């Protein structure tokens, strides 16, 4: 009827924009779940990356400690090598001095042997001279006795 307000019967299609179908909230929910799962996955990846970064930092600190120890050991070895070189030089110097002292001692021993031989020779000459003197005295005593 024409006097009735214009109401659209429930069976007639609406001219207003159609509301999204009932399936859309389910799609939005699925999208939200997918996004939340992606955020969780990214957070897990971030946590793994942070743990790996922390471990890498620890490994770097350990590597620096090892490097410091290796440097100290190398410096110590270098000092020991320098000391060994100094000791070797001192040893060679002492060997040279010992060789010279041995040669000097040998020369002195030769001189002492020569002196002993000379003194022994002089001693033998004195003994012979004493024997001659004794013989001369004996001869003189005999001559004196004969003359008396």
Image (cartoon, rainbow, N blue to C red):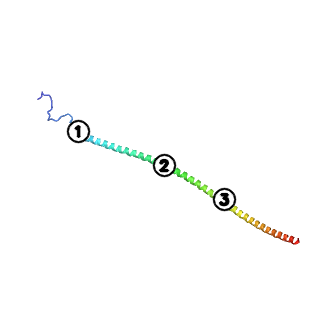
Residue ranking furthest to the top:
3
Please tell me how crowded label 2 is: few (under 14), some (14-19), or many (20+) other residues with Cα within 10 Å. Answer: few
SS at circle 1: helix
**Does residue 70 sit above or below 137 in this rendering?**
above
Quadrant of the rendered image containing residue 136: bottom right
Q: Tag on residue 61?
A: none
Q: Earlier in the sequence, mark 1 or mark 2?
A: 1
Indicate which label's residue lies in the foreground, 2 or 3.
3
Indicate which label's residue lies in the foreground, 1 or 2.
2
User: Which residue position holds label 3?
Assistant: 101
Q: CA distance from mark 2 to mark 3?
A: 47 Å
Q: Earlier in the sequence, mark 1 or mark 3?
A: 1
Residue ranking furthest to the bottom:
146
Q: CA distance from mark 1 to mark 3?
A: 111 Å
Residue ranking furthest to the front:
148
- Residue 121 as seen in the image, left or right of residue 21: right
Q: CA distance from mark 1 to mark 2?
A: 65 Å
User: Which residue position holds label 1?
Assistant: 25
Location of residue 95 in the rendering, given as x and y in whole percent from the top left corner: 62, 58
Location of residue 109 in the rendering, given as x and y in whole percent from the top left corner: 69, 62
SS at circle 3: helix
User: Which residue position holds label 2?
Assistant: 69
User: Looking at this view, is 129 or 93 the one in front?
Assistant: 129
User: Looking at this view, is 20 or 15 the one in front?
Assistant: 20
Picture residue at 51% right of the left edge, 49% below the top: 72
- Residue 38 as seen in the image, left or right of residue 20: right
């Amino acid at each position: 009827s024409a006097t009735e307000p214009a109401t659209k019967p429930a069976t007639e299609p609406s001219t207003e924009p159609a509301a999204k179908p009932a399936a859309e909230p389910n799609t939005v929910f699925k999208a939200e779940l997918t996004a939340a799962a992606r955020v969780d996955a990214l957070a897990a990846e971030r946590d793994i990356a942070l743990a790996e970064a922390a471990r890498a930092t620890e490994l770097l600190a350990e590597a620096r400690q090892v490097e410091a120890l290796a440097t100290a050991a190398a410096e110590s070895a270098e000092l020991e090598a320098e000391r060994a070189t100094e000791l070797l030089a001192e040893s060679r110097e002492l060997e040279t001095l010992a060789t010279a002292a041995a040669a000097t001692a040998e020369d002195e021993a030769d001189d002492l042997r020569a002196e002993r031989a000379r003194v022994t020779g002089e001693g033998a000459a004195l003994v012979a001279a004493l024997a001659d003197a004794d013989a001369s005295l004996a001869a003189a005593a005999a001559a004196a006795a004969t003359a008396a």
